[in-house]
């Protein structure tokens, strides 16, 4: 579950990075996102991402310093597809939700996926407006 603010933060980040792929981490507890951290794409590629090691380490430290856990990873496919690529599946290392952003008719869209053992399952993303 994520708030509209976290959703918008990710959407702005992927839009700013286009036409290159963007990537980032989501920190939280019990599947509830509490922080969104964009991480530099070391590959600077429109078709691949690799988080810059030092920036990724700093993001993990921020998550841990707040007493949170990694609950998700996001990245963009500026030119599609709307699902994890074979490379995304092969390189998935963490048992967390993977959010893939893509452009559809000029608007950024996103879906969530669980990737484990080479298998991909779509998961519902719940975006809420906090009270």
Image (cartoon, rainbow, N blue to C red):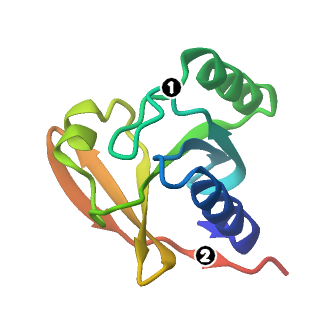
Between 7 and 47, the one nearer to me in the picture? 47
Q: Residue at x 27, y 53 (%)?
A: 84
Q: Quadrant of the N terminus?
A: bottom right
Would residue 63 appear left or right of 77 to someone viewing this image?
right
Query: Of callouts 2 and 1, which one flags the residue occurring earlier in the amino acid sequence?
Result: 1
Q: Which label sits on residue 100?
A: none
Q: Residue at x 27, y 42 (%)?
A: 88
The x, y position of residue 97, in whole percent, is 42, 51
Would residue 18 appear left or right of 128 to someone viewing this image?
left
| Residue at which label 1 appears | 42
Q: In which image quadrant can residue 128 be found?
A: bottom right
Would residue 53 appear left or right of 93 to someone viewing this image?
right
Q: In which image quadrant can residue 94 be found?
A: top left
Between 62 and 50, the one nearer to me in the picture? 50
Q: In which image quadrant can residue 47 be found?
A: top left
The x, y position of residue 124, in whole percent, is 41, 72
Q: Residue at x 65, y 47 (%)?
A: 29
Q: For the residues marked 2 and 1, what is the alpha-carbon distance in whole angstroms? A: 29 Å
Question: How crowded is the residue under tag 2: few (<14 C-alpha within 10 Å), some, or many (20+)?
Answer: some
View extreme (right): residue: 131
Badge count = 2
């Amino acid at each position: 579950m994520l708030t509209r603010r976290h959703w918008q933060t990710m959407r702005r980040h992927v839009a700013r990075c286009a036409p290159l792929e963007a990537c980032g981490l989501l920190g939280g507890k019990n599947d509830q996102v509490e922080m969104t951290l964009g991480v530099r794409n070391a590959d600077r590629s429109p078709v691949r991402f690799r988080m810059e090691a030092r920036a990724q380490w700093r993001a993990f430290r921020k998550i841990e310093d707040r007493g949170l856990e990694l609950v998700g990873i996001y990245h963009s496919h500026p030119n599609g597809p709307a699902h994890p690529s074979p490379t995304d599946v092969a390189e998935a290392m963490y048992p967390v939700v993977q959010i893939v952003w893509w452009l559809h008719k000029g608007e950024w869209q996103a879906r969530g996926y669980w990737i484990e053992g080479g298998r991909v399952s779509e998961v519902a993303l719940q975006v809420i407006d906090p009270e």
